[in-house]
Amino acid sequence: MGQRRIIVAGGGAAGFFAAIACAGADPGSVVTIYEATAHPLAKVRVSGGGRCNVTHACFEPRELVKRYPRGGRELLGAFHRWSPRDTVAWFEQRGVALKSEADGRMFPVTDDSRTIVDCLMQAAEQAGVRLVLRTGLKSVENNGAGFQVALTTGETAACDGLLLATGGNASNAGFAIARHFGHTIEPPVPSLFTFHVDDPRLQGLSGVSVEAAVTAVRGTALQERGPLLVTHWGLSGPAILKLSAWGARALHGCGYRFTLVVDWAPGFNPETLRAALERARAEHPKKQLGTWCPLGLPLRLWERLLVAAGLRPEAQWATVGGAALRALAAQVGAGEFAVTGKSMFKEEFVTCGGVRLGEIDFKTMASRLRPGLHFAGEVIDVDGITGGFNFQAAWTGGWLAGRAMAGKPAP
């Protein structure tokens, strides 16, 4: 057999990792990445506020898969073959040390995404990977056992193996090519987004956060816990982003208009919350309501919740009647907010949807319908919550696909 020719469509995290793995496992192969834009690894550059949240320090595959609203079951075996621990070791072998933060997110110690971009570019170059920019795939046809690829420049290229790592954008060529070979595309809809809320309780509070809140979508089973942040346009933070990921299809289905229920103080249940407020009234009758929050909430937020419950922040605790106390407990423990839309979370656009999971062999990331065709990254119907999980799925899928295309699949 002559030189193996491999084409990787998409110069993102998954595409690069696959190309590097393939060229490394079969040095005689000719591996080419075609990236439609002028900017390879664009999402790696902007991830984590420019710091690049490479992976997550969750090293047990059975725990790790619980962070994937879609694809967790399929990824279990894949994570046994290439885990976050392998990702950390891979970067460290190339001089890039990673660190864990308190929430488990892992970043380069430089806190600079360019460290990761430069490492991947250098690794690709050293492995002999060819990178062609401003060139995407237009269409693909069978060419014997291989493929004949029509490029957006008008040129053509032949290959023995083809990896689609074109991302989750509904208009990308990867979906059209996958369909051409008989694959089903689960409709892509946004995941990881923040909520638009126009409510007097939140106006002027941009930047105020609570360390732990519980958020829920009324009328559904969707519920999440985590830090909650007030923004200029509404609500964000992990308690919102996780909810948006698990509820991606349901929230798309209702046009991003629904009632959000927020428990600002989940350390209390309804009984202990009422008891804490009653105790504050009994022990501090002369104290002004707005000067101190017995529940530990930020004072600016506490003041808004007081007003929403019909109380004046300058009033004394002794003046608060039973009905007002109940109204205040309801504002704190089960405040309802009308959500009227969504915004993408920074530039980290993530989609739910893509090539149907059952049509892919997750040992090799190969198509079950067309030998020689592989998938990795967001083109597949896999997505994780925020915290480095989407990149880990990209590294794992890319490595498995790259090894398989080199003829040396992972055991």
Image (cartoon, rainbow, N blue to C red):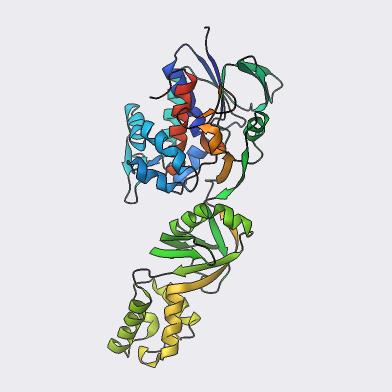
The answer to whether residue 185 is left or right of residue 76 is right
Q: Position of residue 34 (x, y in %)?
A: 59, 25
Residue at screen point 39% across, 74% down: 299
Q: Is residue 232 above or below residue 358?
A: below
Q: Residue at x 44, y 13 (%)?
A: 27
Above or below 214: residue 253: above
| Visible residue check, residue 193 | yes
Q: Quadrant of residue 313?
A: bottom left
Q: Is residue 94 left or right of residue 395?
A: left
> Looking at the image, which residue sits at the far right?
154
Q: Is residue 167 left or right of residue 333?
A: right
The percent coordinates of residue 101 (x first, y second) are 33, 48
Which picture quadrant has residue 229? Answer: bottom left
What x and y, as percent, mark residue 190? 58, 49
**From the viewer's perspective, is residue 342 above or below residue 33?**
below
The quarter holding residue 147 reads: top right
Q: Name the residue: 55% across, 28% down.
A: 368
- For the C terminus, give its image quadrant: top left
Is residue 387 visible in the rendered image? The answer is no
Number of labelled discs?
0
Q: Position of residue 30 (x, y in %)?
A: 52, 14
Q: Residue reaching furthest top?
A: 1
